[in-house]
């Protein structure tokens, strides 16, 4: 069996500046999505066995994230400091260390 090391590809310093920093702006030019193919960006795998659900996942994530940010303010509890964003080692996927958040409806929206 051949497995691609997607973790290493997605963090290849030859292609990404500060690969371990969470910086969504790296995909933007003048606030618009860069119109280019990103080398070494393979969250859904590659080749014949790449993810069959990529289009569905991207459409769902867009709707879920936009809806959440439109309707809710998501903040850290008072005195919580900052959340730890480095990944917790796991077998196949990385998950964040647990942290608490407060979710409030945005001004003018009902509870
Ligand atoms: C953010 C969400 C998702 C991510 C990051 C993701 C990522 C991946 C990755 C990395 C693989 C392995 C590709 C490889 O072997 O090179 C995979 C396989 C697969 N994914 Fe996803 N996936 C996501 C969501 C989904 C969804 C929503 C579905 C179905 C509705 C799905 C269905 C599949 C299937 C069927 C395979 C196996 C394809 C094969 O072996 O031929 N995935 N996915």
Image (cartoon, helix red, strand yellow):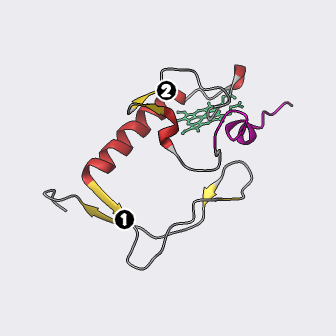
Picture coordinates of residue 105 (x, y %)? 23, 60
Front residue of this view, candidates 103 and 36: 36
Earlier in the chain: of badge 2 and badge 1, it is 2
Q: Which residues lie in the magenta part?
A: 2-17
Crowding at dot 1, Cα within 10 Å, few <14 / some 14-19 / many 20+, comes out as few
Quarter of the image where the N terminus is located: top right
Picture coordinates of residue 104 (x, y %)? 27, 64
Quarter of the image where the C terminus is located: bottom left
* Circle nearer the viewer, 2 or 1: 1
Picture coordinates of residue 38 (x, y %)? 60, 26
Element type at mark 2: helix
Residue at 56% x, 68% y is 98
Crowding at dot 2, Cα within 10 Å, few <14 / some 14-19 / many 20+, comes out as few
| Ligand 1 visible in quadrant | top right
Residue at 32% x, 49% y is 69
Going by the image, does 26 lie left or right of 9?
Answer: left
19 lies above or below 35:
below
Residue at 49% x, 69% y is 82
Front residue of this view, candidates 10 and 47: 10
Picture coordinates of residue 102 (x, y %)? 36, 68
Check residue 75 in the rendering and tell me which mark sits there, or answer none.
1
Residue at 33% x, 50% y is 68
**Magenta segment, prevailing SS (helix, strand or loop):** loop
27 lies above or below 82:
above
Going by the image, does 85 lie left or right of 60?
Answer: right
Q: What whole-number distance in Å separates the C-alpha atoms at marks 2 and 1?
A: 30 Å
Verify CB contact (< 8 Å) between mark 2 and mark 1.
no
Check residue 55 in the rendering and tell me which mark sits there, or answer none.
2
Residue at disc 2, CB closer than 8 Å to ligand 1: no
**Magenta span includes 16:** yes
Front residue of this view, candidates 108 and 34: 34
């Amino acid at each position: 069996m051949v497995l691609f090391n997607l973790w290493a590809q997605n963090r290849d310093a030859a292609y990404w500046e500060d690969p371990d920093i969470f910086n969504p702006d790296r995909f933007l030019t003048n606030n618009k999505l860069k119109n280019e193919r990103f080398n070494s960006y393979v969250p859904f795998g590659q080749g014949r066995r790449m993810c069959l659900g990529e289009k569905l996942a991207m459409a769902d994530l867009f709707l879920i994230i936009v809806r959440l940010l439109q309707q809710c303010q998501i903040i850290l509890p008072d005195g919580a400091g900052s959340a730890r964003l480095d990944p917790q080692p796991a077998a196949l996927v990385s998950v964040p260390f647990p942290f608490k958040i407060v979710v409030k409806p945005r001004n003018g929206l009902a509870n």
